[in-house]
Amino acid sequence: MIPYSFQTIYDDDIREVEKVLKSPFLTQGPKVKEFEEALKTKLKSKYVVAFSSGTSALLGLYFSLLYTKYKLFKSPKDFFYKKIFFFLTTPITFSATSNAAVFLGGLPLFVDVDENGNISLDKLYTFLEILKRKAKNILKNIKFASFVHYAGNPFNTQKIYEILKEYNIPLLEDACHALGAKNENEVVGESKYSLGSAFSFHPVKPIACGEGGAVSTNDKKMYETLLLFRNHGLKKLSYWLYEKEFLSLNHRLSDIHAALGLSQLKKLEKFLEKRRRLAKIYYKLFKDIDFAKPIRQSNYSSYHLFPVRFKFKNLEKKKKYFENLRKKGIGVQVHYIPVYLLKFYKRLFKDFKEIYTKIYPSLDLKTFLKESYKFYKEELSIPLSQGLEEKDIYKIFDVLISEYKKL
Ligand SMILES: Cc1ncc(COP(=O)(O)O)c(C=O)c1O
């Protein structure tokens, strides 16, 4: 099976991990700091804090914003009587983008995507205007927007920032797909227009730690909060004395994972160059195909995914195609089932029906967020990875076409 994405590990990566295994520190040693320093240079941001996963990084990012800007979770009471707040996000993302905020007491407000799976500028503006007319109290209680750079293809942070600014909503970036990507204004993670960005180093992502993540920010207070958040909310006062500032858990990255990440980071440009080169071949091959169109990605995308929109008569056909391709060894994947369709979120919408019906008539998100649902019906991510070769791309393409014709 050719997976939709997979890691590429070299002998020198293994040697770096081995060195840590033979060193005194498997965790809380020097490698984490070294990894953070290297990321900071790559991302051109003032601060970077490594985390045990992209999910922990998102949780830390959201917490540090709520803690520093809105003074939430300052009192232990805040953990028992969570004050509801709202946040904006899109449904075409891994549910962690939303889960991490719900965990802290946030209710998601889903905004529609554009045809490439990223937050739509128009839909965002229209949505905020609807809230202004129909639900001012909700609008006032939106604490942040967190949007994913879908597939590693960055949305325009400056334009989104400018819309959000009108409503006093800070932007956060779910950059879990997008290490090494750039948009017209900045490197993803530079966070010129946001208060911070979260990354993942899961093996399918641009570089692999095994499990791992990081937050980049330019905000000193958020940085200091992130450091505490990662380690139980503990503040070291002297060699033996420490204090607990707020409630948190262990979200630390180990030195073993950091060593792998650091070694992989040195290969990032090489990996991206390969992904971009292979993507170009796909684009050429799909050019004359009328039943399948790859989403448009910039030359500076990280190409974490290569999503293609297929014309299917219905979802059953898509399912059949998906299964047939996997039987043929092509590990396609769906990115994503809209988050609002997941059981937990359906229940959340029911539990907070009174609030949500003010915004989404009859709670019919499939209709209200038209493009997201259409995207879900059509999209399949086809294999793209630095570990593939040109001949694999031609082979994958041929199977995709012949299996489609059999539908
Ligand atoms: C968009 C997005 N956000 C967050 C995450 C969570 O990252 P991790 O798996 O490292 O916890 C992922 C991982 O798949 C993701 O794709």
Image: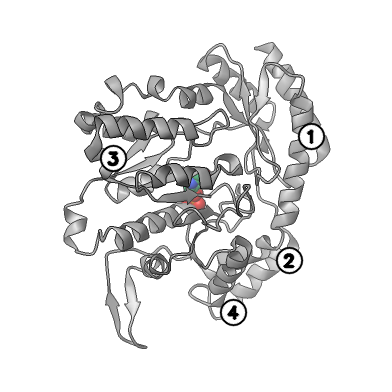
Label 1: which secondary element: helix
Say which label, 1 or 4, has the lower sequence index.
Answer: 4
Task: Name the residue type under label 3.
Answer: Leu
Spatial CA span between label 3 and label 4: 52 Å
The CB of the residue at mark 4 lies under 8 Å from ligand 1? no
Q: Position of residue 10 (x, y in %)?
A: 73, 59
Q: Is any part of residue 96 visible from this angle?
A: no
Q: Residues within 10 Å of mark 1 (few under 14, many from 20)?
A: some
Q: Between marks 2 and 4, how big is the CA–CA gap? A: 17 Å
In the image, residue 280 sits, relative to residue 257, either above or below, namely above
Image quarter (top left, top right, bottom left or bottom right) of the C terminus? top right
Q: Amino acid at mark 2?
A: Asp
Circle on res. 281: 1
**Nearer to us in this view, 164 or 384:** 164
The answer to whether mark 2 is within 8 Å of ligand 1 is no
Q: Which residue is mark 2?
A: 12
In the rendered image, the residue lying farthest to the bottom is 239
SS under mark 2: helix
Q: Which residue is mark 4?
A: 23
Type of residue at label 1?
Ile
First in sequence, mark 3 or 1: give its number: 3
- Say whether disc 1 or disc 2 marks the residue closer to the N-terminus: 2
Disc 1 + disc 4, Cβ < 8 Å: no
Q: CA distance from mark 3 to mark 1?
A: 45 Å
